[in-house]
Image (spheres, grey):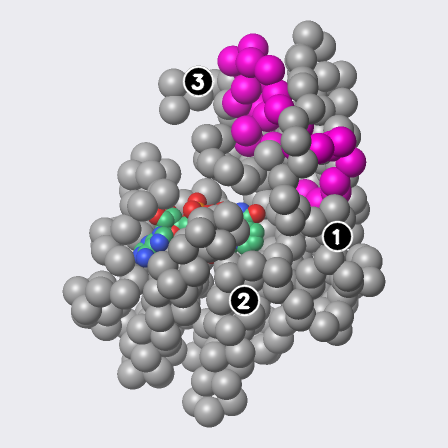
Amino acid sequence: MKILVTGGAGFIGSHLVDALVEDAEEVLIVDDLSSGKKEFINPKAKFFEGDIRSADTQSAIKEFKPEAVFHLAAQKSVRESIRKPAYDAEINIIGLLKLLETCVDLGVQKFIFASTGGAMYGDNANLPASETEPENPESPYGLAKFASEKYLQLFSRLKKSKTMILRLANVYGPRQDPFGEAGVVAIFCQRAVAGETLFVNGDGKQTRDYLFVADAVKAFLKALSLDASGVFNIGTGKELSVLDIIMNLKTQHAPDLVYEHREPMAGEMLRSVLNCEKARQELMWTARVDFAEGLTKTFQYFKNNQNL
Ligand SMILES: NC(=O)c1ccc[n+]([C@@H]2O[C@H](COP(=O)([O-])OP(=O)(O)OC[C@H]3O[C@@H](n4cnc5c(N)ncnc54)[C@H](O)[C@@H]3O)[C@@H](O)[C@H]2O)c1
């Protein structure tokens, strides 16, 4: 099958492309390399370097004629979206709409979207949050993802195509950027390997649902294979705190690890965890990699790639 992966040079997208290529699919990656990396690009995939908003990019997609689209290209920083909401909306909403117009022109029947579980339900959700929980994004990033979901669902109805929306938990693993503002597992692994002090915002008891990237990829592949539309939470259903991550690192990999507390981040959510029962029942997907195993793979990756 001919498959387009936007953001296919990024953290999650590059793992997804590897799996698709392994399944002998014909893949076109579209990525502007703003945060993605050339070295993550699978050599068996075609690659077009461009912004999803540009006419050249849309022409390249039209020439390729994908039958299915995975849309992962995004401005992914919650904090950046608060600093620059218009910039966030240009990439995350207008970018999506440009891509959607092309997909409608081409009659693409299957669109799979990387949405967010962590930034969708807000602070007052019943936890673990299921898909029936009211959406209450607390950032422009979350709001843009929610608006994108709504556009996709509308066009899916108008054009009778299938749209799968995966609300991903906090994904971690090899190739995640360890120098960003988010991605605590990657940041901690990189600093632990370098023998540097870890910094914990506040008391470190804030929790997230940490999903290993290989499990996220399997959910994307299931979404491709299923002839359906829908919204699915994709996570582990388990909460881990920042201190839990540090304790895992200390006991498994870095006994001499040192950490310090800093001021809490204003507006940071205290808890986030997803109920993924719908994905288990309808997608036949469940997270398989437990945190200790995923952490080991991530730590080893940063140990082996210290010059990144
Ligand atoms: N990492 C997570 O925990 C997480 C959680 C929920 C949702 N998501 C979503 O999953 C997707 C992938 O996230 P990631 O963590 O792999 O991030 P990433 O930054 O590694 O990947 C995004 C990719 O999109 C590319 N890109 C950005 N703007 C572009 C543009 N205008 N045109 C073309 N390419 C562009 C970047 O170069 C990068 O390769 C994003 O949509 C993100 O919002 C990620």
> Disc number at residue 143?
2
On screen, residue 216 above or below 163? above
Which residue corresponds to the image point at 47% horizontal and 36% vertical from the top-left? Answer: 180
> Disc number at residue 273?
1
User: How far apart are the two marked residues, 1 and 2, measured between alpha carbons?
Assistant: 18 Å
On screen, residue 187 above or below 95? above
Please tell me how crowded label 1 is: few (under 14), some (14-19), or many (20+) other residues with Cα within 10 Å: many
Q: Is 97 on the left-hand or right-hand side of 211?
A: left
> Disc number at residue 306?
3
Q: Position of residue 139 (x, y in %)?
A: 56, 59
* Image quadrant containing the C terminus: top left
Question: From which residue to which does the magenta span run?
Answer: 185-212
Which residue corresponds to the image point at 27% horizontal and 65% vertical from the top-left? Answer: 53
Query: Would residue 6 be visible to someone looking at this image?
Result: no
User: How far apart are the two marked residues, 1 and 3, measured between alpha carbons?
Assistant: 31 Å
Q: Is 58 on the left-hand or right-hand side of 265?
A: left
| Mark found first going from the N terminus, 3 or 2 | 2
Please tell me how crowded label 3 is: few (under 14), some (14-19), or many (20+) other residues with Cα within 10 Å: few
The three-letter amino acid code for the residue at tag 1 is Val
* Image quadrant containing the N terminus: bottom left
Question: Mark 3 and mark 1 in contact (Cβ < 8 Å)?
Answer: no
Q: Is 135 on the left-hand or right-hand side of 98?
A: right
Which residue corresponds to the image point at 35% horizontal and 82% vertical from the top-left? Answer: 104
Q: Position of residue 9 (x, y in %)?
A: 36, 46
Q: For residue 115, what is the image quadrant? A: bottom right
Please tell me how crowded label 2 is: few (under 14), some (14-19), or many (20+) other residues with Cα within 10 Å: many
